Amino acid sequence: MKITQSPLKVIDFLVINSRLKFTSPSEEVNIKELFSNYSIDIDFAKVIQDDNYQIFMKISVNEDTTPKQVGYSIFAEAVGIFSLVKEGLSKEEIENYSNYTSLIITINHLRNFISNLTSYGPFNKYVLPSIDMRDLITQKRLSIIKNPQTKKRPQVIKKDMAKNN
């Protein structure tokens, strides 16, 4: 089948901070079970600049557990830069592309980054599990209502900085 290009264009994806730490277990562990018990925290923000918009995202895996779980402790922060051709789209479609589809694309880019990063580790690759997007967005909305300071605007990545030369 031939594809139809989306009106949502991915201009770039940039990892702006990351760290990976491995804590060795003192005894044999079931890696699959260990991975499924990792705590995962995701935060994101959208910034509009000119005709582009940016989805900033932070993902922490097994970083905030006490006592610390063995295995990987992962942090990744990235920005997805997008443009949207709005001609011919309804208001609902524009909102869907700019608020949901771009968020999903950014998560998938980070999922791939984390998988590649951990693929060289002792426990092999860690794949970020599927995420209930409705719940994630609901949690974000509630956090902004409870604490309006969480809506603090991240620093914009300038278009010129994101161009590949």
Image (cartoon, grey):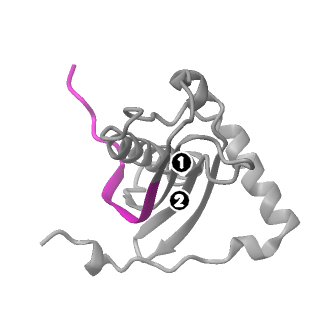
Judge whether residue 16 is colored magenta.
Answer: yes
| Residue at 73% across, 55% down | 140
**Where residue 42 appears, x then y in whole percent?**
62, 52
Q: Report the predominant secondary structure element of the magenta stretch.
A: strand
Q: Residue furthest left?
A: 165
Can you identify the residue that label 1 sits on? 90
Q: Which residues are magenta?
A: 1-20
Marks 2 and 1 in Cβ contact (< 8 Å): no
- The residue at which mark 2 appears reads as 57
Q: Nearer the viewer, residue 49 or 15?
A: 15
Look at 59% across and 59% down and name the residue there. Answer: 44
Mark nearer the N terminus (2 vs 1): 2
Between 40 and 89, the one nearer to me in the picture: 40
67 sits left or right of 129 in the view: right
Q: Residues within 10 Å of mark 1 (few under 14, many from 20)?
A: few
User: SS at mark 2?
Assistant: strand
Q: Is residue 95 above or below residue 143?
A: above
Q: Amino acid at mark 1?
A: Ser
Q: Quadrant of residue 17?
A: bottom left
Label 1 sits on a secondary structure element that is: loop
Residue at image point 56% right, 46% down: 100
**Rendering coords of residue 92 (x, y %):** 60, 47
